[in-house]
Amino acid sequence: MNFKMRIFLLLFFFIHCSVQAQDFQEHLISFLKAYDRVHFNNSIIVLCNDCSPKTWETCPFPKFILLDSIKSSEFNNVKVICEKSYHILKVKFINIGEYFIASRNIVKGTKITDKDIFVKYGHLNKIPVDAYTNQNDVLGLVSTKDIKKNEFITKSLFCPIWLIKLNQKVSVIIKSSGFTIFAEGNSINNAYEGQEVKVKLNNGTIILGIAKDRNSVIVYK
């Protein structure tokens, strides 16, 4: 066998093995996303202890069973079934997606805008568990403490924007089939948009409604 033929065979084997390993991981990723679309919504990298092409090149359609509850920062046991045989893999899942850091120093009490945060992209396993990964969830929040530049944007730094505040005078709209009643009272708890709020009416009756805007509560009967 001449030198050129040896090089060709080596290259063919390398490419063939690389494709087989890639195909196997693609099968595994597809299984994981179908298993838990919410958890694996972002792209993932799969690291396993035995994803070598020699092991799986004869198994074009492997079946998978997740044997553990999902642990993102640890290895998980995945059973791989190929025809009549099976093997247990040790697999680690790495979620990749967007997260946010402060683009500048933010003073306590600031209402967050897109100028206050910077989008980053990377391994979500390495960021705080309460870090925000959706920009729409961050914008409009009010910081409860000073935030330093480049600090992770986490839920612990904010409080919701209260539409209704404790003991606030509010208008109450009571809707039922065929009629609408208007009343007034004082809120018994804080509430943001769409949250339940108790109101003590002027006659002393306590009712439960939904915060509609900064001055009104709607009740459906």
Image (cartoon, grey):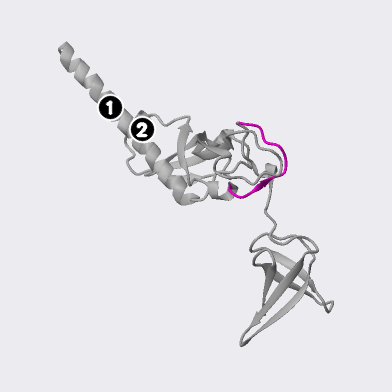
The residue under label 1 is 15
Asked if residue 91 shows in the view, the reply is no
Asked if residue 219 is positioned above or below residue 149 in the image, the reply reads below
The N terminus, quarter of image:
top left
Image quarter for residue 181? bottom right
Residue 3: percent from the left, percent from the top? Answer: 17, 11
Q: Residue at x 23, y 25 (%)?
A: 12
Q: Residue at x 71, y 60 (%)?
A: 191
**Magenta-colored span:** 139-149
Q: Are there few (<14), some (14-19), or many (20+) residues within 10 Å of tag 1? A: few
Give the residue at the far bottom of this rendering.
178
Image quarter for residue 183? bottom right
Whole-angstrom CA distance, mark 1 to mark 2, is 10 Å
Q: Earlier in the sequence, mark 1 or mark 2?
A: 1
Marks 1,2: beta carbons within 8 A: no
Tell whether 123 sits left or right of 108.
left
Marking on residue 21: 2
Q: Residue at x 64, y 64 (%)?
A: 194
**Amino acid type indicated by mark 1:** Ile
Asked if residue 162 is positioned above or below residue 51 in the image, the reply reads below
